[in-house]
Image: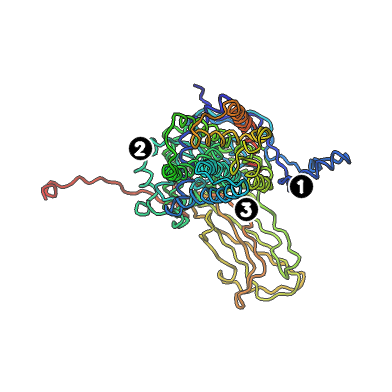
Amino acid sequence: MSDIALRMEHIYKKFRKGEIYNSLRDLLPAMTGKMFRGQELNANDKREFWALQDISFEVKRGEALGLIGRNGAGKSTALKILSRIMKPTKGRMIVNGRLSALIEVTAGFHPDLTGMENIFLHGTILGMTKREIQSKLDQIIAFSGIEEFIDTPVKRYSSGMYARLGFSVAAHVDPEVLVVDEVLSVGDYVFQQRCMERIRAVIKAGTTVLFVSHNLKSVTEICKRTMLLDHGKVVTIDETDAVIRKYLNAGNPAATPDEKKPVYISSVKVRDRAGEQSTFESGHTAWVDIEVTAREATDKLAVVIWFADETQYIIFHTSTERLGFAPVSLQSGGTYRCTFELSLNIAHGTFHLFTEIYRYDIQKSYDRYEPVTTIFVGSTTAVGGAVNCFPRLIESETVAPSPHSCEV
Amino acid sequence: MKEELQELYRYRELLYMITYRDIKVRYKQSIMGFFWAILMPILIVMSGIVVRYAYAMVAHTPLQTADIASVAIKAVPWAFIVSSIRFTCNSLTGNRELVVKIYFPKEIFPMAAVLACLFDFFVAFATLSIFLVFMKIGWSIYLLWVPVLLASMVLFCVGIGMIVSAASLFFRDVKYIVEVFLTFGIFFTPVFYDVRMFGDRGKWLMLNPVAPLLDGLSACIAHRESPDVHWYLYSLIFSLVAFLGGFFLFKHLEPAFAESI
């Protein structure tokens, strides 16, 4: 058996944009038009575009490969080709072993059936046999955590319960190759953690995993190697941290002046000592330079900045006014510059920086960029969560039970 | 083709589960479900009796029990054919999520739709048998033909079903065309009438591949005689061609389903 679990060789996929003939009523006149007037039936040739171009990569048995990229980069198309839902226009692909996709974990559910019935239905759709499902039934139900509603039709479930049950079934397929796409966005925090643990366990058990996510933090947690896609092409395949750095550096959109606003943020730069930067070490210092330009005279302005994590939870915010600076008044055509110095005592992860021009006394927002830039914080200390408290273990001791307490 | 059939065989449990789903959802309220299964057959049988009564009036002959039985025996399978083709037509477009998101042999959808209708058919046919017993239509050796004829009919429906389901995925107006055929098909199919009424010209009506099957069922149940074997073979070949052709076409188009639906 070869040690390659997954391989794509020069895969191309072409799509057609816009409306294609999807009814005979449109197609037949178009065809007769072509026959009698020599009209081109495929007048929409120009509307073709390549969703994937020359994608080649391989994943070794037992390896976890991350796949990141902006919306429309071709991640989902690549997954659909891998899971054989779509056929590539060109190219060759090899999948060794049973492939299962955690793509849409509730696609197989029927709302009128009970949780139990849906476990069997969805399980068979995902390629399990009835006997297999029967043997894992208790695990599946326990994992979903909805024992008491298992005989209720799933249409009465909350969306979280729905997704949990779907994931539980999908997570018990035991494939040789597992493709995961954005499933972790469902359920509450505890459930997400459980999903991550399950995926880690699956990797530990030797399953090959292809992990697609916008959540860069979970990609770093799960995958050693990551592939970056952009506009249907492979940008790079490398160590996850390096790829994420590249991804973030490439993608920070420049602040564009908006013509309608009386005052706007004309520039935002995040830098370290050396210059503009988007990756930082936890605990280091970052400077944020902000420039505000006024088109019309405006009074009492403050500049607000905040960080939000992957889940859009705001972990930190401050403003010029909060830091004790008097509100700024600008004349027409005037500019204002400020620099924030920040100690990045935040944990390993990806954080979005937001900026806003705000007037406190009338609570008016003039301009806002969300997120103006994204930074990636690396950490040498293994800490989880949002902040880095720079822990040190200063005492560690095991206490043997005293002989008296044993007799009680 | 062989590989594809093997794959279908590997997924047989899924075929069973999807069929089960389709039936279960329809019979969720068991009384309504049962009612649904016999509603269309009852309506067709009743209209058949009206038509037959009109024939008898015109011909000045009394209405025979065997004629009523024959109409009923042909009407119930006809209802099966109509409903299974109607359901297969929407079987892919109605399961969009699964077509787009998960890989498995998609011919399972039209097949499951036919099987779910077959279940309805058995419910209706069981109900009909009770009436047939009251009408004193008894056993005969020719009843052995019934499963053979039904198998042909299922083969035919699955074949046509695969074609119309794939076609309506690509062209949304196919279902209206199919609906027109299903509505007016009854006039070109010997359900209310017998091909024998047309004398020699009856053979033209038998060219309809469904005709020999319905006629055969009526012959072996109501008239206790063997169906016309030659016409049956014609129909069987037609069904086989529909099935194999439909399967081939379906498999050929399947890779484009996810992006065209």
Compared with B22, B1 (above or below) is above
Circles 1 and 3: CB atoms closer than 8 Å: no
**Residue to which mark 2 is pinned:** A135
Position of B230 relative to A112 (above/below)? above
User: Reading the chain from its start, which is encountered first: label 1 or label 3?
Assistant: 1
The residue shown at (60%, 47%) is: B60
Query: Marks 3/2: CA distance?
Result: 56 Å
- Any mark on residue A271, and which? 3
Please tell me whether mark 1 sits on a helix, a strand or a loop: helix
Disc 3 marks a residue whose amino acid type is Arg
Q: Residue B202, position in %: x, y? A: 66, 35
At x 69%, y 36%, the residue is A53
Q: Nearer the viewer, mark 3 or mark 2?
A: 2
Secondary structure under badge 2?
helix
Q: Amino acid at mark 1?
A: Asp
Whole-percent x, y for residue A169 in the image: 43, 43
User: Is the residue at mark 1 from the same chain as the one at mark 3?
Assistant: yes
**Protein chain holding label 3:** A
Question: Which marked residue is nearer to the observer: mark 1 or mark 3?
Answer: 1
Q: Are marks 1 and 2 on the same chain?
A: yes
- Looking at the rendered image, the disc whose residue lies closer to the viewer, 1 or 2, is 1
- According to the image, label 1 marks what residue? A26
Q: Nearer the viewer, residue B67 or A12?
A: B67
**Residue B173 image position (x, y, % from top left):** 69, 47
Q: Which chain letter goes with mark 1?
A: A
Query: B138 or B21, which is in the foreground?
Result: B138
Q: Residue furthest front?
A: B60
